[in-house]
Amino acid sequence: MKHSHVTQTSLILSQSGIRPGFAGFKALIAVTFALALSKESSAATYATQCTALDICYCVNTDYRDAINDNVARVRQLIANNKAQGKAIGYLSVPLSSAGGASFAVNAEAAAKTADSVTARFGARSVWLLDPGAEGGSGMNGASGADFMYMWTQILEGRGGLGEDFDFFYFVGPTDFAAYFGLTGQGDLDRLEDWFDKRVAQDPDFKKSVDQGSVTKAGFRNYYGLRASVTFSYGSHDEWNIARLINDRRRGATDFGIANQLAIVFDGRPVTPGGYENPAASGDVGRCIK
C-alpha cells in the first residue's frame, strides 16, 4: 500500500513540474501523507453485527448511531399504537432500484399499498409499519445490510419472538398492479405509457433515465413481470425472519401454533406449509476478512 502511494504521488509531482531535490522530497512527503489521510478517511469500516435471532449482517459502523436511534424511535411508534389497542403489521416491500426498478416509484407504491391494507382492516384497528416511510433520516447512503440489521432488530423484538407485531404483509404483483392501474389487458403497453408520462412530468425521474439508471425496457419488464417481494433481497430476509419467529412461537408455551404471526402475501393469507418454508437469503452474511 505504501509503495502505491509513493508511485501515485511521484506521478502527480512529475505532472505538476516539481523537480527532484530536498524541496521536491518535502513536497513528495506532504502529498503522500495527504493522499493516505484522504484514503483512510474515505474508507468505511465494516463489522459483523448479529441480532437476537442470531441473524448476522456486515454493517457499516458509520451507521451504528443512526440504526440505534431509529430502532428506538420506531419501537416507540409501535408502542404508541399498541397502547391504542391496534394490531401491528409490517409491510415487506421492494424499495431498491435493483432489477430495473425505481426507488421513488417503489416508495410511492409502498405508501399506496400501506394505505390500502390499512383501509382493508380499518384505520381504527390496525397500524402498518411502512419501511419506506420510517427508514430514518440518518440512513442516507446506507446499504441493504445496514437497513436489514435495523429492521431485523425491530421485527424480532427484545425477546426474539416478534412480540411487538401481529402480522406481516408481503407485497406482491397484484399490489403493484393496483398502484399502476393495470387491468390485465395490455399491461406492458400500459407501463410503457406510464413511463413516458412520468418522464415528461417528473424532472428527477427524467434525470435518472438520462443517466441510464432507469431504462424504459427494464422498467416495463420489472413492474410488469417481477414487481414483488419474490425478487427483493431484503424481503427474502424478512420472510426468513417471520419464519424464524413463528418457529420460536410454535415451541413457546406462551404462544404456540395458535399465536403465530399472521402472514399475508399479495393480499391473501399464506397456507400452513408456507409458514415453515425458508427462502434464499438476501443481505444476510458476516463480514469476510
Image (cartoon, rainbow, N blue to C red):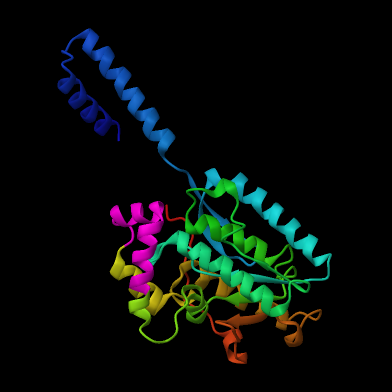
Q: Residue at x 78, y 61 (%)?
A: 79
In the rendered image, the residue lying farthest to the bottom is 272
Residue 51 lies in what quarter of the image? bottom right
Q: Residue at x 45, y 60 (%)?
A: 103
- In the image, residue 263 sits, relative to residue 68, either above or below, namely below
Residue 40 colored in magenta in the image:
no
The magenta stretch spans which residues?
Answer: 191-214
Residue 171 lies in what quarter of the image? bottom right
In the rendering, at what x and y percent does residue 137 appear?
A: 58, 47
Residue 11 placement, left or right of 254: left
- In the image, residue 117 sits, relative to residue 134, either above or below, namely below
**What is the quadrant of the N terminus in the image?**
top left
Residue 239 lies in what quarter of the image? bottom right
In the rendering, at what x and y percent does residue 161 appear?
A: 71, 71
Q: Is residue 52 visible?
A: no
Q: Residue at x 33, y 72 (%)?
A: 192
Residue 16 placement, left or right of 219: left
Q: Main secondary structure of the magenta part?
A: helix
Q: In the image shown, does 113 or 230 lie closer to the viewer?
A: 113
Q: Is residue 56 visible?
A: yes
Q: In the image shown, does 21 or 198 lie closer to the viewer?
A: 198
In the rendering, at what x and y percent does residue 136 appear?
A: 60, 51
In the rendering, at what x and y percent does residue 240 appear?
A: 56, 75
Residue 203 colored in magenta in the image:
yes
Residue 64 placement, left or right of 9: right
